[in-house]
Amino acid sequence: MTDNDATDASLIKASSLLRESSERLADGAETDTVPRLLAEAARCYDAVAGKLSADDAETAASIAVGRSAIAALALQQCALDELDCDWSWTDGTDGPYLGDMAEYDEDGLSEELAARAIEAARAALDADPGDPLVPLHLGHALCWSGDRDGAVAAYAEALRRDPGDHVARDSLAELGEEVPEEDDFDGTESPDRRYAFALVREDARISNSEWSSTACVFGSVDAARRDADETLKSCDNGGFDPEDLPTMLKLTLEIHRPGQLITRFPVEPLDASFLVDWSGLPESEPLDPPLPPGRPVRIDGETCFHGGPR
């Protein structure tokens, strides 16, 4: 394994740990293990940073974004578990109310975590100027802390980067700001991002009337295809009938390129073998410039971590 391979593997491992932390907080399951997962992710980033060359700006940016995500998730875990704050940021549809820290945290348990989240987000703010993830981290931490003006500026920056981010839009409205209309955004074109990437979106039925949506991003179409195939393979091993699959699980592979229309491929098995006809998928076309390994992105109001071992 080359040094570059080892670096990529560490960044992808860190991303998988962040994804697992986020999912546990969203599901309200084993949330007491989240600090351990975040500490392991931090060690991955520290190991990469210790070998970083001065001219490797992309890897430095990935580390900064990852550290911002760690700090944001640590604050979230504290608010939910330690302070029992009814904050629905777990499902990505909401953020804190202004000054929630003063209401829920009389003992200041989250004060240091909030300061760390603000510091980490500011350090990563320009790491990926086309993605709204870090400004949203900053907005939530500032809003929690009671800094209205700072939160407004951060949420406005997130919305500028992605006019379709409903969380940034709703957070601004909650703070009493006039929010631009969304008429010019229809979700068919990628926002003004720096990178191309593939995305596998998984919609799973959780009740008769509710679906849960998750998505992972990949730096190549081939890697995304393999992930979709593995998901279908797990359905096959789990005894699913392919005919019943559309009522339980919907998979879509998306290709995002800067300034171009999003290309979507519904992932539908041909028969009981759970094999998919991928003949129309442009696997040989490189994604240029590719999303750096381990880099999370935020799209459609949802944080998507880099795909890796589940």
Image (tube, grey):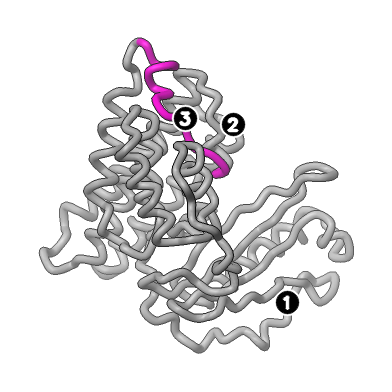
Q: Main secondary structure of the magenta part?
A: loop
State the residue position of label 3.
97
The quarter of the picture where residue 255 lies is bottom right
Q: CA distance from mark 1 to mark 3?
A: 45 Å
What kind of residue is marked 2?
A: Ala
What residue is at 13 percent from the left and 68 percent from the top? 55
The local secondary structure at tag 2 comes to: loop
> Across the whole image, how many numbered discs are drawn on residues?
3
Taking the spot 57% from the left edge, 43% from the top edge, the residue there is 93
The image shows residue 273 at horizontal and vertical percentages of 80, 72
Name of the residue lying farthest toward the left: 54
Q: Which type of secondary structure does the marked residue at label 3 adopt?
A: loop
- For this rendering, which residue is in front, 183 or 225? 183
Q: Nearer the viewer, mark 3 or mark 2?
A: 3
Residue drawn at (26%, 43%), measured in percent from left and top? Answer: 120
Residue 65 placed where, x, y %? 32, 53
Q: Which residue is mark 2?
A: 29
* Amino acid at the residue labelled 3: Tyr
Residue closer to the observer: 262 or 3 = 262
Residue marked by disc 1: 276
Task: Tell me if residue 171 is in the magenta stretch.
Answer: no
